[in-house]
Amino acid sequence: MVKGIRNSKDKNEKLKFIQSSLEMFDNTESQRLKDASIFAVAEIRDIDAFKMIITRNDIDKELKVYTIDFNYLLLDELLSKDTLTSQEIDFVVECMEIHPITDAKVKIVKFRDGSNDKETINKLNKVIANIDAYGANAVIKY
């Protein structure tokens, strides 16, 4: 089912799937069902679903790490843009604080070096230091 949703061009179908999965997460006491619902949302490889998982405070770090691993190519695609909004930079920063990935460093350095905003430069310097200290290689086998 997840593959079908992932390959669907129907944004409404994806949104319904995401909403029903997150409803299951919110309304069950079973940790197994909670985990399964987040795995399912992560595996559709949708940037909006990716952002929803990462920004929710009630989702375990381990599930967020899995989501970042599984969706690294979406993150790389985001980092391949010429410019990023402040929200996109904040999303990248949050991802790299949770699970620093060495493969992202070159593109993050590019954004830092191209920025004139001191706050952005400081955020990205911290991310780069985190990657240097704790970074892992991206998992691209999915």
Image (cartoon, helix red, strand yellow):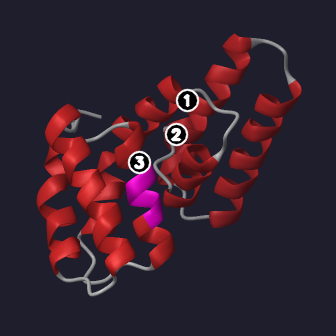
The C terminus is located in which quarter?
Answer: top left
Mark 2, Cα crowd under 10 Å, few <14 / some 14-19 / many 20+, is many
Q: Secondary structure at mark 3?
A: helix
Q: CA distance from mark 1 to mark 3?
A: 17 Å
Mark 1, Cα crowd under 10 Å, few <14 / some 14-19 / many 20+, is some
Q: Please, is residue 20 above or below residue 66 in the view?
A: below
Q: Residue at x 49, y 38 (%)?
A: 43
Please tell me which residue lies in front, 138 or 85.
85
Which residue position is annotated with label 1?
Answer: 39
Q: Is residue 97 left or right of residue 63?
A: left
Queried whether the magenta region covers residue 34, the answer comes back as no
Q: Earlier in the sequence, mark 1 or mark 3?
A: 1
Dominant secondary structure of the magenta stretch? helix
The N terminus is located in which quarter?
Answer: top right
Three-letter code, disc 2? Ala
Segment colored magenta:
90-94
Q: Secondary structure at mark 1?
A: helix
Q: Secondary structure at mark 2?
A: helix
Please tell me which residue lies in front, 88 or 45.
88
For marks 1 and 3, give the one nearer the viewer. Answer: 3
Q: Please, is residue 30 above or below residue 87 in the view?
A: above
